[in-house]
Image: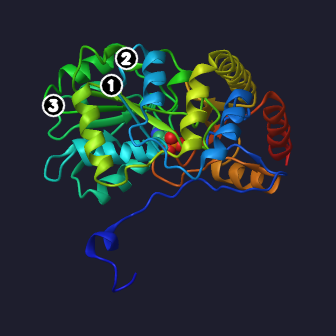
Amino acid sequence: MSKFWNPLIKQLEPYVPGEQLDDPAIIKLNTNENPFPPSPKVLKAIQEESVKLQLYPSPTVDELREEIGSFFSLKKEQVFVGNGSDEVLAFSFMTFFEPGKTIKYPDITYSFYPAFAKLYQLDVEEVALEDDFSLPVEAFFQSEGGVIFPNPNAPSSLYVKIEAIEEILKNNPDQVVIIDEAYVDFAEASAVSLIDSYPNLLVVQTLSKSRSLAGLRVGLALGHPDLIEGLNRAKDSFNSYTMDRLAIVGAIEAFKDTAYFEKTKQEIIAVREYFRQELEKRNFYVLPSQTNFVLASPSDMEAEKLFTQLKQEGFLIRYFNQPKLENYVRISIGTQEQMSKLLDAIDRIIKK
Ligand SMILES: Cc1ncc(COP(=O)(O)O)c(C=O)c1O
């Protein structure tokens, strides 16, 4: 705390990301990164673009917005892009939510939302998830200031059907409903199909998970052109160049290389299902994940102990020391080889 900080900065509770260790000996399964490298086409485009780094990038990022638009069958006016979906979410909170009008999000959810709420001095109703971590859909109806939740939710890994999202949209006609689809490529379907029917829907996605580009920092928002115009007003009052040249060309190639995207995504889903079954054989309760991670509870030992002992064995997973999650660990899905090694380590720990 410093006397030079203004009162707003003094009251913030910043988000704390999962540990980022650079040690190659550690198998890192704690921040839901993709175990596969980016598409070779992405790497080639970035290398070629690097000779132009003396020039500013495009402030409107039209080429990438057009590419994303064509992927989702939307116009570029329905696409906003930014420096990771965290930044896109920050602009979305800034643009659509306001102090004095209570917004709703789940009590167990992405822990950046409370940090944004503090930053923008918003009033929040944290809606309690059901005991099985499912979303109480009707509790999100008639919000005063708007709604946000991830679908699938994190860290629960659970997916809400599009029909339920549609009900939430219908019951918040004058408020923006933000669906954070960071993990949707590993799930049943995106809410993008509802965009043309609901001007209050903003869908946020990221290239950090299913497209292996967490280090490039690219996120996007999809919605009615009026919502996108609002986001651009916020961005251009803050930083016109949130996306650098390398991120722009890399993201364009990532969207073009659909074959690589499909192949790596299917592989992760297959490994997830294998890993879930193997955990169940070892007496874990595993939530039915539609993401690239699982939330699991060991019945033969404490979750926190498992987390600590796996760390000693060179495996980084995530433990959340918070109500309702004390008995769970979150494990990102790596390669088949990484998950087999992890299972061997779990067996050694259980035997002890
Ligand atoms: C639900 C959810 N939303 C958004 C993000 C942020 O992703 P990024 O800023 O890398 O695009 C994450 C990252 O873990 C997440 O879990």
Nearest-to-viewer mark from 2 and 3? 2
What quarter of the picture does the N terminus occupy? bottom left
Q: Which of disc 3 and disc 2 is earlier in sequence?
A: 2
**Element marked by disc 2:** loop
What separation in Å lies between label 2 and label 3 (alpha carbons)? Answer: 28 Å
List x then y, in percent, for residue 324. Answer: 46, 45
Question: Residue 265 lies in what quarter of the image?
Answer: top right
**Would you say residue 30 is visible in this rendering?**
no
Q: Is residue 321 left or right of residue 132?
A: right
In this figure, which residue is indicated by the disc labeled 2?
Answer: 74
Circles 1 and 2: CB atoms closer than 8 Å: yes
**Element marked by disc 1:** helix
How many residues crowd around disc 1 within 10 Å: few (fewer than 14), some, or many (20 or more)?
many
Which amino acid type corresponds to the residue marked 2 in the rendered image?
Answer: Leu
What separation in Å lies between label 1 and label 3 (alpha carbons)? Answer: 25 Å
In this figure, which residue is indicated by the disc labeled 1?
Answer: 78
Q: Residue furthest bottom?
A: 3
In this figure, which residue is indicated by the disc labeled 3?
Answer: 142
Q: Relative to 315, is 181 above or below?
A: above
Which amino acid type corresponds to the residue marked 3 in the rendered image?
Answer: Gln
Nearest-to-viewer mark from 1 and 3? 1
Q: Relative to 118, is 212 above or below?
A: above
Q: Point out which mark residue 37 bears.
A: none
List x then y, in percent, for residue 199. Answer: 21, 23
Q: Residue at x 80, y 28 (%)?
A: 336
Circles 1 and 3: CB atoms closer than 8 Å: no
Q: Residue at x 64, y 20 (%)?
A: 257
**Would you say residue 206 is visible in this rendering?**
yes
List x then y, in percent, for residue 101. Answer: 14, 47
Which amino acid type corresponds to the residue marked 1 in the rendered image?
Answer: Gln
**Element marked by disc 3:** loop
